[in-house]
Amino acid sequence: MWPVRSLGQFQRFYETVARITGSYTQSVQVNDPEVIEAVASMPASKDEHKAQPPSWWRFDAVMHRLTDIADQLIASRAHDDNVKFYPRPVNPAAKARQQRAISRQDDAIERSRQANAERRKKQLNM
């Protein structure tokens, strides 16, 4: 079986299984004394406690609903405008589309400003 699979495929499989909460692989990895020492001796980073958007991997419809419920609970307890909701996975296509829409709006505003400036110049010259 293993001659058919490459080392990269095995590593991706191992990483996938190791991410599953409660799996034997994750249990062995978390309880390994070398891993414990390596993690304990890692320097603390300033972004360690900053919320990062989750990946699309295993972020299914149930996760979407649970995140919506959590956000509703956060909003119901909010007392000011500084509310931080749970992060969602980033969709690169939607982000690029939004940036292009903003760029088109900015271009239209700039064209309108230039047309307005030209119209004012004509009115002043008359």
Image (cartoon, rainbow, N blue to C red):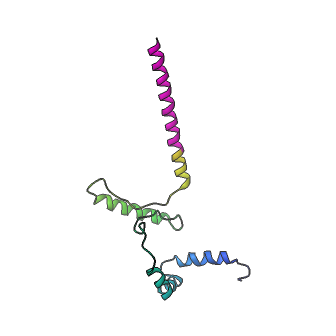
Which residue is at 70% across, 77% downward? 6
Could you say which is closer to the camera, residue 112 or residue 74? 112
Which residue of the protein is positioned furthest toward the top in this rendering?
Answer: 126
Residue 78 coordinates in the image, percent (x, y): 28, 58
The answer to whether residue 63 is above or below residue 81 is: below
The answer to whether residue 31 is above or below residue 16 is: below
Residue 84 coordinates in the image, percent (x, y): 36, 59
Which residue is at 27% across, 54% downward? 80
Question: Can residue 32 be seen from the camera position used here?
Answer: no
Could you say which is closer to the camera, residue 89 or residue 35? 35
**Would you say the magenta stretch is mainly helix, strand or loop?**
helix
The answer to whether residue 16 is above or below residue 117 is: below
Which residue is at 46% across, 84% downward? 37
Magenta segment includes 61: no
Which residue of the protein is positioned furthest toward the bottom in this rendering?
Answer: 33
Could you say which is closer to the camera, residue 77 or residue 12? 12
Decide if residue 49 is on the left or right side of residue 78: right
Magenta segment includes 110: yes
Which residue of the protein is positioned furthest toward the left in this rendering?
Answer: 79
Residue 64: image quadrant is: bottom left
Segment colored magenta:
100-126
Residue 8 coordinates in the image, percent (x, y): 66, 75
Residue 76 coordinates in the image, percent (x, y): 29, 59
Question: Can residue 81 be seen from the camera position used here?
Answer: yes
Could you say which is closer to the camera, residue 93 or residue 43? 43
Q: Quadrant of the N terminus?
A: bottom right
Which residue is at 41% across, 67% downward? 46
